[in-house]
Amino acid sequence: MDIPNNTSGTSTDGDGAGVAPKPADQSFLDVLDQEIENGGGEWEEHPAYIGSVGRTMFDLPNSKDNLVSVLLPKESSQALPSQTLVLIGHPDYGDRRVYQGIIVQGPFYEPDGLRGDAPLIVTTTVRGATFMPRYHGRVEVEILGEIVGDTVLPPRYRPQPNSPVFALGQEETAAALKIDGDITLGVAIGHENMEVSFPSDKKSVLPRHTAILGTTGGGKSTTVANQINELHQAGVATILIDTEGEYTHINDPTTHGPMLKALERRGKTPHGVTDTYVYHLVGRETSNPRHPNRPIAFTLPFDRLSPYMAMEILELNEAQQQRYLKAYDLAKNLLNRLRIFPADNDDRNQLLELDELEQGYPKLTLQMMYEVVRACASRVAKELRDENNNISFTLRTLPFRNDVDTFLQIIEGADLPSHVWSWRTVQGRLSQLLRLGIFDSTRAQRLNYDALTTPGRVSIIDLGDTDSPQINNLVIAELLRGVQEQQNENYRRAQTRGEGQRRVVVLIEEAHEFLSAARIRQMPVLFQQVAKIAKRGRKRWLGLTFVTQLPQHLPDEVLGLVNNFILHKITDAHVISRLKRIAGGIDDGLWQRLPTLAAGREASLATRGGPSKWLLCRTW
């Protein structure tokens, strides 16, 4: 192509001063237009790229599955902050596949055509000179799936190089993550006022159990209190096992200054949780005696305690267990002979269905069991009768005292193991339980599980005055079993009477004291009951939430029951490594944030029958 002369730009006069450029000759412009037309016309961006903020890059030898690098021009280098959801590809371009992804690393800033640590850049920077080459942005995107119709499926391919990348808006992001619901967890970090919520009316969420984990001061208590309030407003019956008594004042609005400011920013006013009830063990104090609904004292029924669980709680060795079970059989024989149980045909039918791995013998009290063990120990020691041939100690159980002859006949006619000290040990352990005064007390009532599972009711089991992990474990074991039985009845009524199905969530504070690895080794029967409840609860709208500041003490058997994790600050690398192995499918960049999360920030993982979803959010 011939280019006319004198088409250029700036010339100088004699003094070297700039002179305005001369316009190009018309002949040159005509030739240029002709060449453009011959080449197909002016360049236009493909419609598939309109609205895109970046493009995918070629893969490198160190590329990873489900992780794609995206380059952004300088003008869009801050268009994709961390956790932004993106769409990659276009249905009318390239391979016509569209992928959904989330920003897990970056944005990073790189100079165009140079390495970030190029000598030219390093030298000018350390010498204080100003040298700023043009630069672009780079982010790493985790591919969540391929969009096929209205469904996100596991991806079979990777996005092709130079595919357009689009940032989703707040409403599109919320819809893609399915974070809509009536239970609000917090506000997503990186988005303006995008609340992270989940539905309380789907079996795939709450009944699949939750773990709230984090170190002291990370914000777990705030999360728990918020969840209680949200569950209450959603009509879910909430039962909180409060081992420290710190939630008994949840009916009062907060007075915490920073939290008040955070609520003000979100346009909310502080308020307490209504319809709350506080329960405490008989003979123990409550942490909030001035609660508007007078705190309710309750007693534990010994006949609901499985003999095998009782032996675990009493920490009996093999020889002592043999003697306990022998006395247990004698006590059952006594109740039968004295017509205490079974007393009628209904009792006999109940006896046929009795599973002693699940519960104890009906109508058998702790006082009865203690007196039978004491009599056996006295007989082995040849001290059962006094010099007048009467029983050598006072029977406090009225049916036994009214028929001493039958009592002595059964004890003396039994084939008892010898070694009196094993008998005395069992007697001593039962005596310790008796002195606690928490079993079969006439000064309190048993827990009313129908009331505990009332929709919207918040029941706080205050164990702050027990100071005994054994007692706490007794209460938790009885509570879980009672709630499970009530939910079975609630489910039956919902099916046969057309009543609405009650939804129940049980939160266990300081779960490591109840379900630590050491505790499970000592009390395998107790853990088997918890595991059974966890598995059956999914079908009966019964969800468990484990809360602990020492997640390293929770064994894999417990974490394996959990599908939803709410993680606060965790600094222990071993704990993070375990959670990564159990949760799976989460990018390392997100795990690396856990040790540095501030109070009130958390990472929430939910598996709702599809790909795992991680989202950082702020609870206040």
Image (tube, rainbow, N blue to C red):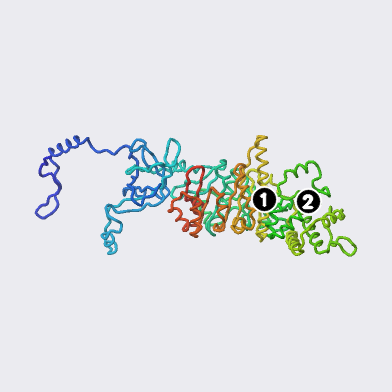
Q: Residue 101: horizontal and vertical position, in percent? A: 41, 45
> Which image quarter: residue 146?
top left
Estimate the x, y position of residue 140 in percent, counting from the top left. 38, 50
State the CA–CA distance, disc 2 to disc 1: 25 Å
Q: Circle 2 sits in a helix, a strand or a loop, which is it? A: helix
Residue at point 80% right, 62% down? 380
Q: What residue type is labelled 2?
A: Lys
Q: Name the residue under label 2.
A: 332
| Occupied quadrant, residue 475 | bottom right
Considering the numbered disc 1 on the image, is that residue within a helix, a strand or a loop?
helix
First in sequence, mark 2 or 1: give its number.
2
Other residues around mark 1 within 10 Å, as few (<14) / some (14–19) / many (≥20): some
Q: Quadrant of the N terminus?
A: top left
Checking the image for residue 471, the label placed there is none
Which residue bears the numbered disc 1?
A: 479
Q: What residue type is labelled 1?
A: Leu
Where residue 82 appears, as percent x and y from the top left, is 41, 50
Mark 2 surroundings: few (<14), some (14-19) or many (≥20) residues within 10 A: some
Residue 604 image offset from top left, x and y in percent? 50, 50
**In this view of the protein, which residue sits in the foreground, 460 or 356?**
356
